[in-house]
Image (cartoon, rainbow, N blue to C red):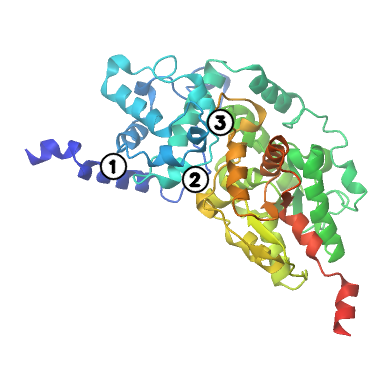
């Protein structure tokens, strides 16, 4: 009798929660599953390949058990920025519909059944649901697998999503720009390519936004100018025309093949130029190189991946950068893919406290609130009552900070756009951490004067 009622009790969910913890132990929140290995596919095996799922019965057995652990506690829903913005997504309801399909075989159809496409596209893959789940469910895995079905099997995507994939296919970048001369503007700043500087210590991964978006270029320029001022410019190099997209947008959209193609190409370049360390301004590239490329090629485990906030903190701690503390009030917007997915929380705070006063928002660090750009959402639209970026900007402005410090070119773009639309550009500055550090640097001549 006791055994018979266990599935109806909290003990059952606790046991399955332990199971979920064990099967996902050591797996970063930002790492998606790899449904196949592109290197091992043959023409014959590719025709038999099953990617994603549209029916609860098609879900792998281990993942079925993971969903059944759900206690319907609403924590994932309460933490979800898409739900807060009035988008057609509740991560709890996605899992609930999966559970219902598992228990009712005649109602197991998910896509074109209990789940509408916009539920899946509404997700920013921010990981807030997974971070707060008491039984360790990986909601994003289910959503991405259904996206994979829509993209790779059903071929059901709108024009904006199609354009993104077309850009990645034709131009090898997400911005739809020719890669020719991609980093020519950096030559004017004294940055050399890997061919020109074969003894480089760090590969500066500029990224699609950093290469082509004017605002993101300013972030790269600030970082480069800091390195020049402290005499470290020769320690970095860029790939120039050979740099392509890291593949994050393709993978989050559900196009696994294109992601792996880009990853394999980039890894070969890293091997060719003997890359040992990579610095990136983009948390999405950071997460992709650090957590996902090693699953494509274990060689990547040898590469040290560094976010520019970590690099700047290191230079300040070593005394290579000296900064002034000013009467400026800062608040920090933590990117989901940096703070929550990868636990990089302290470097930016250690830096900002050296520059002025830091005021935290309620949602900061691992509990940060998404800007709305993740999960490839930057490139397409989803029905919503309020923009996620507007909700986040309001949270940040509640601190009455003079400057919002960003650590991601996408976050910077989303919050800057929100400030423009809401008409508050004159009330708050939105600057990358490299820009606030650059503005606070004590130059050598200033140090000399102060010593006299």
> Is 330 or 52 nearer to us in this picture?
330
Residue behind mark 2: 29
Task: Give residue 389's quadrant in the image.
Answer: top right
The mark nearer the N terminus, 3 or 1, is: 1
The mark nearer the N terminus, 3 or 2, is: 2
Work out whether 7 lies above or below 227: above
Q: Is residue 293 among the parts visible in the rendering? A: no
The Cα–Cα distance between marks 3 and 1, rounded to whole angstroms, is 33 Å
Residue at the far bottom: name it: 452
The mark nearer the N terminus, 2 or 1, is: 1
- The kind of secondary structure element at disc 2 is loop
Residue 340 drawn at (x, y percent): 53, 49
Is 269 displayed left or right of 82 in the figure?
Answer: right
Residue 119 drawn at (x, y percent): 48, 25
Residue behind mark 1: 16
Task: Give residue 163's quadrant in the image.
Answer: top right
Residue at the far right: name it: 188
> Is 353 or 106 nearer to us in this picture?
353
The Cα–Cα distance between marks 2 and 1, rounded to whole angstroms, is 19 Å
The Cα–Cα distance between marks 3 and 2, rounded to whole angstroms, is 26 Å
Residue behind mark 3: 40
- The kind of secondary structure element at disc 1 is helix
> Is 353 or 28 nearer to us in this picture?
353
- The kind of secondary structure element at disc 3 is helix
Is 35 displayed left or right of 306 in the figure?
Answer: left
Q: Are marks 3 and 1 in contact (CB under 8 Å)?
A: no
Q: Are marks 2 and 1 in contact (CB under 8 Å)?
A: no
Q: Tell me the crowding category of disc 2: few under 14, some 14 to 19, or many 20 or more residues within 10 angstroms, Cα based.
A: many
Taking the spot 26% from the left edge, 24% from the top edge, the residue there is 103
Residue 74 drawn at (x, y percent): 36, 38
Between disc 3 and disc 1, the foreground one is: 1
Task: Give residue 245's quadrant in the image.
Answer: top right
């Amino acid at each position: 009798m006791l055994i018979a009622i266990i599935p109806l009790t909290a003990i059952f969910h606790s046991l399955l929660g332990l199971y979920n913890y064990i099967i996902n132990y050591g797996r970063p929140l930002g790492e998606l599953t790899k449904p196949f290995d592109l290197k091992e596919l043959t023409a014959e095996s590719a025709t038999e390949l099953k990617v994603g799922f549209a029916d609860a019965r098609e879900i792998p057995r281990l993942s079925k058990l993971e969903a059944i652990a759900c206690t319907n506690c609403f924590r994932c829903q309460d933490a979800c920025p898409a739900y807060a913005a009035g988008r057609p997504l509740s991560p709890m309801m996605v899992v609930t519909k999966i559970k219902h399909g598992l228990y009712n075989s005649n109602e197991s159809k998910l896509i074109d059944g209990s789940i509408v496409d916009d539920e899946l596209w509404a997700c920013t893959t921010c990981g807030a649901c997974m971070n707060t789940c008491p039984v360790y469910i990986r909601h994003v895995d289910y959503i991405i697998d259904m996206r994979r079905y829509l993209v790779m099997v059903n071929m059901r995507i709108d024009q904006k999503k199609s354009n993104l994939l077309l850009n990645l296919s034709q131009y090898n970048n997400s911005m739809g720009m020719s890669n020719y001369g991609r980093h020519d503007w950096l030559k004017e700043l004294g940055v050399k390519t890997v061919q020109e500087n074969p003894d480089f210590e760090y590969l500066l991964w500029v990224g699609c936004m950093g290469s082509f978006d004017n605002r993101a270029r300013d972030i790269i320029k600030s970082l480069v100018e800091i390195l020049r001022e402290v005499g470290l410019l020769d320690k970095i190099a860029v790939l120039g025309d050979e740099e392509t997209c890291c593949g994050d947008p393709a993978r989050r959209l559900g196009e696994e093949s294109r992601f792996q193609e880009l990853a394999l190409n980039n890894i070969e370049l890293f091997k060719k130029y003997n890359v040992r360390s990579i610095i990136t301004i983009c948390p999405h590239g950071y997460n992709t190189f650090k957590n996902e490329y090693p699953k494509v090629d274990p060689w990547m485990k040898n590469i040290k991946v560094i976010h520019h906030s970590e690099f700047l903190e290191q230079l300040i701690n070593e005394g290579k950068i000296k900064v002034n503390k000013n009467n400026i009030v800062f608040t920090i917007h933590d990117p989901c893919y940096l703070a929550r997915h990868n636990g990089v929380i302290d470097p930016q705070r250690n830096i900002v406290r050296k520059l002025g006063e830091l005021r935290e928002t309620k949602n900061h660090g691992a509990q940060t609130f998404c800007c709305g750009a993740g999960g490839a959402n930057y490139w397409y639209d989803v029905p919503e009552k309020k923009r996620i970026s507007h909700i986040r900007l309001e949270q940040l402005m509640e601190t009455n900070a003079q400057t919002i410090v960003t650590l991601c070119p996408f976050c910077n773009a989303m919050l800057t756009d929100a400030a423009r639309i809401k008409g508050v550009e004159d009330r708050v500055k939105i600057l990358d951490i490299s820009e606030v550090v650059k503005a606070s640097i004590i130059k050598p001549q200033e140090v000399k004067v102060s010593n006299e």
